[in-house]
DNA sequence: AACGGATCTAAGTTTACCTCA
DNA sequence: CTTGAGGTAAACTTAGATCCG
């Protein structure tokens, strides 16, 4: 085990050396101050990213215009109303999921899910005026496509967002929110990994400290029984684990005496050197 | 150069929904 | 079958940074 590898977790949020599979994606967008420029560049190639991904939706759904309202009927009753609105950063929820339908959701095709799970109150104005917000649950297909997209790039430029929203039959705002939350989850996961590394580091250091304390006690006993050490301050006696010399940490004449005295307190790195206790 | 609006993101919070005991 | 707790994720809010006219 190498000390630096354990403790250099880079827990500075966004500047880490942990080898996390998601890390690269995260750092691709770390410097978001430059993201506007990056987005402008990356938008040029976005059309090649998902050349053939579909949700199995009808062409009319795929190319639905913003603000279009689709009403589906099942057994003669209005079963769902799907709104596609744009331009509202304070998006009100435009879909409602029937609880009896949700459990079946993942077994349905995207089209079926859209038909049966997206519902809205009769009065959209009421919805916007503060009725309980309803939460859309993404289908497996939608989640998969979003995840794939996230692997390609952790942030989206407007063009990418628009294209993805169209592909998924979601509002661009929903795609945007998903990416925001996804980045947050990635970062949280990364932080948890780093936390675990720090715990390991702490435990190793604690163990080593305990071992060194024990060694110190033993050396104090040696000092008492061996008069040759009497002139050295007991509390600063140390033993180099590699050459097994004893020093007092005061500085001079360290190289020639078998009882070396170091200029500076020596920090023994247990991760890069074999333990003296072993 | 300074200013203000538009836009984006991170961070934190709220809340709908789901699972499970 | 119902219920409450806890977890998850979608949606929201806020603050700060950057760009651009």
Image (cartoon, coloured by chain):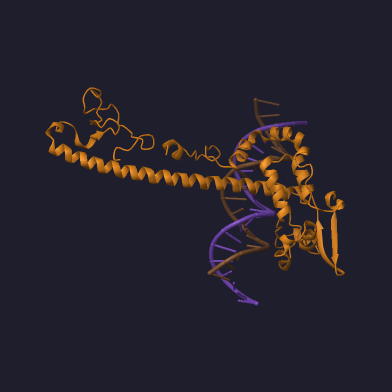
Chain colours: A orange, B brown, C purple
**Front in this rendered view, residue A131 or A215:** A215
Looking at this view, name the residue that lies furthest to the front: A278
Which image quarter: residue A269?
Answer: top left
Which quadrant is the N terminus of chain A positioned in?
Answer: top left
Q: Nearer the viewer, residue A240 or B12?
A: A240
Locate residue A41, reporting x and y percent: 73, 32
For image coordinates 25% across by 41% down, the residue present is A215
Q: Locate the C terminus of chain A by quadrant.
A: top left
- Count of numbered tags: 0
Corner quadrant of residue A160: top right
Q: Is residue A66 above or below residue A267?
A: below
Q: Position of residue A188 (x, y in %)?
A: 56, 48
Q: Position of residue A156 (x, y in %)?
A: 71, 41
Specify whether A132 is left or right of A200.
right
Q: Residue sitting at 86 percent across and 65 percent down?
A: A73
Q: Is residue A76 left or right of residue C20?
A: right
> Is residue A89 shown to the viewer in this render?
no
Q: Is residue A276 at least partly visible in the picture?
A: yes
* Residue at the (21%, 41%) spot, across then down: A218
How far from the left and from the top, in percent, is residue A140?
A: 71, 55
Residue A89 vertical position relative to residue A227 in the rendered view, above or below: below
Q: Is residue A166 above or below residue A81?
A: above
In the image, taking residue A28 as reference, residue A196 lies left or right, namely left
Query: In this rendering, would B19 be left or right of A225?
Result: right
């Amino acid at each position: 085990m190498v000390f630096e590898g354990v403790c250099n977790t880079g827990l500075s949020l966004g500047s880490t050396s942990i080898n996390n599979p998601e890390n690269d994606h995260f750092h691709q967008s770390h410097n978001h101050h430059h993201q506007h420029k990056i987005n402008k560049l990356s938008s040029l190639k976005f059309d090649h990213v998902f050349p053939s991904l579909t949700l199995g939706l009808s062409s009319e759904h795929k190319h639905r215009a913003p603000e279009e309202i689709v009403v589906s009927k099942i057994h003669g009753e209005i079963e769902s109303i799907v709104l596609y609105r744009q331009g509202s950063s304070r998006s009100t929820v435009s879909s409602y999921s029937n609880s009896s339908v949700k459990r079946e959701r993942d077994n349905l095709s995207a089209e079926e899910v859209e038909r049966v799970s997206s519902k809205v109150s009769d009065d959209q104005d009421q919805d916007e005026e503060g009725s309980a917000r309803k939460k859309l649950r993404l289908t497996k297909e939608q989640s998969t496509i979003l995840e794939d997209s996230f692997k390609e790039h952790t942030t989206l430029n407007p063009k990418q967002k628009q294209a993805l929203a169209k592909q998924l039959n979601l509002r661009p705002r929903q795609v945007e929110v998903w990416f925001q939350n996804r980045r947050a989850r990635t970062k949280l996961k990364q932080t948890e990994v780093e936390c675990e590394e720090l715990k390991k580091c702490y435990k190793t250091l604690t163990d080593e400290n305990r071992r060194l304390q024990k060694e110190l006690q033993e050396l104090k006993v040696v000092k008492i029984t061996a008069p040759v050490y009497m002139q050295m301050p007991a509390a600063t006696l140390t033993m180099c684990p590699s050459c097994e010399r004893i020093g007092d940490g005061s500085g001079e004449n360290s190289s020639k005496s078998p009882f070396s005295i170091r200029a500076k307190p020596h920090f023994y790195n247990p991760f890069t050197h074999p333990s003296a206790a072993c």
